[in-house]
Amino acid sequence: MSRRPSVRHQSPVAGAQARSRAAFRQAFLLVLLATALAVVVPLRAQEPAARVGAPQAPGAVHTVRQIPEACVRLEGSYAQAGAAAPYALQVVPLGGACQPRARYVGAEQAQPSAAAGWTLNDVVKIPEAACPGREAVVQVWRKSGADAPARDGQGQARIYLEQGRGQAAAGASRLPQYSAVL
């Protein structure tokens, strides 16, 4: 005499309740994830941490930062005692076969600020060797260029000749820009 194992059948109401609980659990986890992202994303968008360079002697020319996209190097030097400007910052083009993918614009011309669409890219602090409490602070700003072209039905970014000429005439294909403020 063999017995069949008993099979429990779930009532339609119990099945609906289980689906409802699962949907509520998923919605709750989605809200929790969205809340966590809302807190974390602004924290990641804060200013970059300042990098502190090696102490520099007055009169010694040193590299503050290189901007390879714009094929330039920022060089600085502390002035000797009694000079009008205590620190000088110069932009030096990189030699060789460097092909710029961005443009460097002087701070006077660019006037970089977050309100004008610029993003603070880097902060470099350079202490003076003769006076440890004295340091020069250089802010490197970046402004994005034109947006990437839209993708077509095949997922390719295509620029056709006439369309490219029209964008070039309108100035839409501008390069990203960099600027430095002392």
Image (cartoon, rainbow, N blue to C red):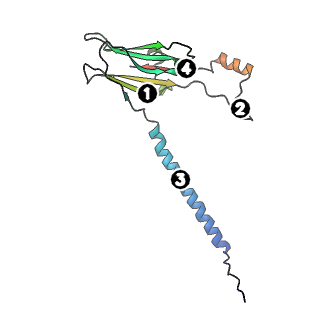
Residue at disc 2, secondary structure: loop
Tell me which numbered mark, 1 or 3, is placed earlier along the sequence: 3
Q: Amino acid at mark 4?
A: Ala
CB atoms at circles 3 and 4 under 8 Å apart? no
Q: CA distance from mark 3 to mark 4?
A: 40 Å
Tell me which numbered mark, 3 or 2, is placed earlier along the sequence: 3
What quarter of the picture does the C terminus occupy? top left
Q: Amino acid at mark 1?
A: Asp
Q: CA distance from mark 4 to mark 2?
A: 23 Å
Q: Crowdedness of circle 4 by 10 Å Cα count: few (<14), some, many (20+)? A: many
Q: Which residue is mark 2?
A: 156
Q: Which residue is mark 4?
A: 102
Residue at disc 1, secondary structure: strand
Q: Is residue 164 left or right of residue 50?
A: right
Position of residue 26 relative to residue 161, above or below, is below
Position of residue 51 relative to residue 30, above or below, is above
Q: Residue 31 bears which disc, if any?
A: 3
